[in-house]
Amino acid sequence: MSSDPSGESKLSPVEGHKAESRYLRGTLAEELADPTVDHLGDANKSLIKFHGSYQQEDRDARKTRGKAGVGKAYMFMIRLKLPGGKLTADQWLALDDLAGKYANGTLRVTTRQSIQFHGVLKANLKATMAGINDALVTTLGGCGDVNRNVLACPAPTGDPARVQMQQLADAVAAHLAPRAGARSYHEVWLNGEKVDHPTPAAEVPNPERDEPIYGATYLPRKFKVGFALPDDNCTDLLAQCLGFLVIREGGKPVGYNLYAGGGQGQTNSKPDTYPLLAQPVGFVEPDEVVAASEGIVKLFRDHGNRVDRKRARLKYVMKDWGLEKFREVFYRDYFRHPARPPKDAPITGLDLHHGWQPMGGGKWFLGLSVENGRVKDDGSLRLRAGLRAIVARFKPDVRLTAQQDVMLCGISTDDRAAVDSMLSEYGIPRPESLSMVERWAMSCPAIPTCPLAITESERALPGVVDQLEKVLAELGLGGEPISVRMTGCPNGCARPYQSEVGIVGRGGTKYTLYVGGDSYGRRLNAEVQDGVPVEQLVPKLAKVFAAFKAERVNGELFGDYCARVGLDRVKHLVGAG
Ligand code: SRM
Ligand code: SF4
């Protein structure tokens, strides 16, 4: 296994932590058991990510605590692993209990169809993890240098293509789950107890047997898989390290176009980091999907960069090699099945799955728009309490979308009116009553929890959306599905480089403004202006919206307009060049 493609440089320190960890055990159990310390040392701070948790601090408290000389207010974020975003009603209720008991009273739906808890104290970590596992949900591999949560459109429409895709997403997630790492997970969090997860035993380390896919040092960096349909790219397939796009013939799923090498993150100080869209590698049949995912993971394991973590993503293997070499190595060394060219299947849509939609057999699902994925009670909008009451009463399955929204599934026709009236009782808006810009908007958490945030995002976007709503309504553009995504740094957690308007934290209250992506996630946007103060974002955009209204042709969408007229014209409009 080549850990250092250059053969010259020193491996990143995280490689050392992994190598010494004995399949992710480290000394986590010992550090967790020490009641005198409220945080973890460096090695375990890095290891705990593989177990689905990040050590954070309350950044709102940083200044006052610093002045008072009392140090950081440490707390932990916990991220679940929920392939395809699926939960039962009882699981939702159990997680809601845990959010109230041990976290900050909110559940955060993520851009990868999962849930995060924030604000868990070290002393409560084990109890929270045990509670999550009691609900038969795991956090193993929620973070860390392994395969992350597998995305698949969660809409339960009964469409055979969706059914097959959701089953294959589960199969890929199970196949790529850490194996010896699962045993460490159970030892650390569940006192070695076995629950319903793969737990191969390995007393004498033997990476080929114990972690046959990953090996003892796992992957160079995180790895992400997503499934989507050509007419519904609600998982943003082209942002994934590995994407499977359903191919239908005669209405039936016959296979998948395999895409590789997508990703969003970039670092301001490193010009050799940038967002990239995944490239079409080939076509695979349904029974080849799991083997193909293993092959791509192994290719990344062997050829990803283990020296520079900023360039340690599969997208840079694709970029540095080019598609032709990537294909050649993949089919020659990692996937010995016929090399078939990708089918002609352009992406043509993205469904937010909002509102009541039929599932067949007299059942319905209801897609609700959740502002920035944050399920909380806030004044008259009692989203958390309302969801809890509806889920407790009607026991719907719950599904989460990669657009940070929630679906309640399996509600009978007779119960629809009662659900609607409960929504009103708890002040929860039906998606149709919200503006288009709010429904399409996404933000990452940023301050106060994210240690990497250099600006606000989740707490800033609602104000920006309010202003955008006014401007768009005045221009008569309120009905346009314009996607606006904001992040508190360039890492791109809300996939801001694939939206029509991207707003990326630059520092303080300034942002970099991007336009020209499309609402279906097929194109990267482009930087229009750097260092824009937050209060100037909407006035600048208003000028572009006005030009769009005057100059659009044949009902083109906003992002397509920006791409057609070009960056120079948009820069001129906003006064950037
Ligand atoms: Fe992310 C790191 C939140 C999806 C690219 N991401 C982080 C951390 C863990 C900060 C850290 O490393 O300490 C953030 C925790 C904030 C907090 O307080 O909760 C964080 N990322 C999120 C979530 C919660 C954003 C959201 O609004 O939902 C998403 C959790 C997904 C999940 O359930 O697994 C989330 N992150 C993404 C995505 C979108 C996606 O996967 O489709 C991306 C862009 C795609 C990609 O991977 O390129 C993304 N996150 C990053 C990066 C940049 C990686 C890179 O290649 O440079 C970082 C920084 C890092 O890893 O060092 C990061
Ligand atoms: Fe944190 Fe940056 Fe990701 Fe936002 S985009 S959650 S600020 S790492």
Image (cartoon, rainbow, N blue to C red):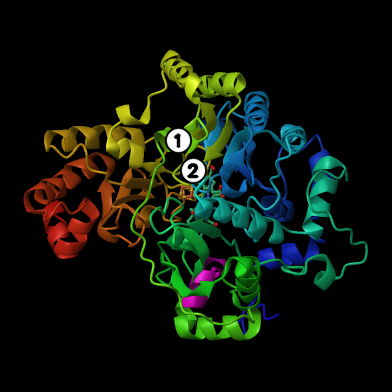
For disc 2, the marked residue is 157
Quarter occupied by residue 516: bottom left
Q: Residue furthest right?
A: 203
Amino acid type, mark 1: Pro
Q: Name the side, left or right, on which 250 lies relative to 550.
A: right
Quarter occupied by residue 443: top left
Q: Is residue 322 visible?
A: no
Q: Indicate the quadrant containing the C terminus: top left, top right, bottom left or bottom right.
A: bottom left
Residue 138 locus on image (x, y percent): 71, 44
Look at the magenta stretch and give its main secondary structure: helix
User: Please, is residue 506 above or below residue 478 in the view?
Assistant: below
Residue 97 locus on image (x, y percent): 66, 25
Magenta stretch: give its range.
309-318
Q: Name the side, left or right, on which 267 lies relative to 103.
A: left
Amino acid type, mark 2: Thr
Residue 128 locus on image (x, y percent): 72, 34
The answer to whether the residues at label 2 and label 1 have Cβ atoms under 8 Å apart is: yes
Count the numbered circles shown. Answer: 2
Q: Is residue 162 visible?
A: yes
User: Please, is residue 524 above or below residue 36 in the view?
Assistant: below
Q: Indicate the quadrant containing the N terminus: top left, top right, bottom left or bottom right.
A: bottom right
Q: Is residue 79 covered in magenta? A: no
Distance from Cα at disc 2 to Cα at disc 1? 7 Å
Residue 358 got which mark? 1
Secondary structure beneath disc 1? strand
Residue placed at 79% from the left, 64% from the top? Answer: 20
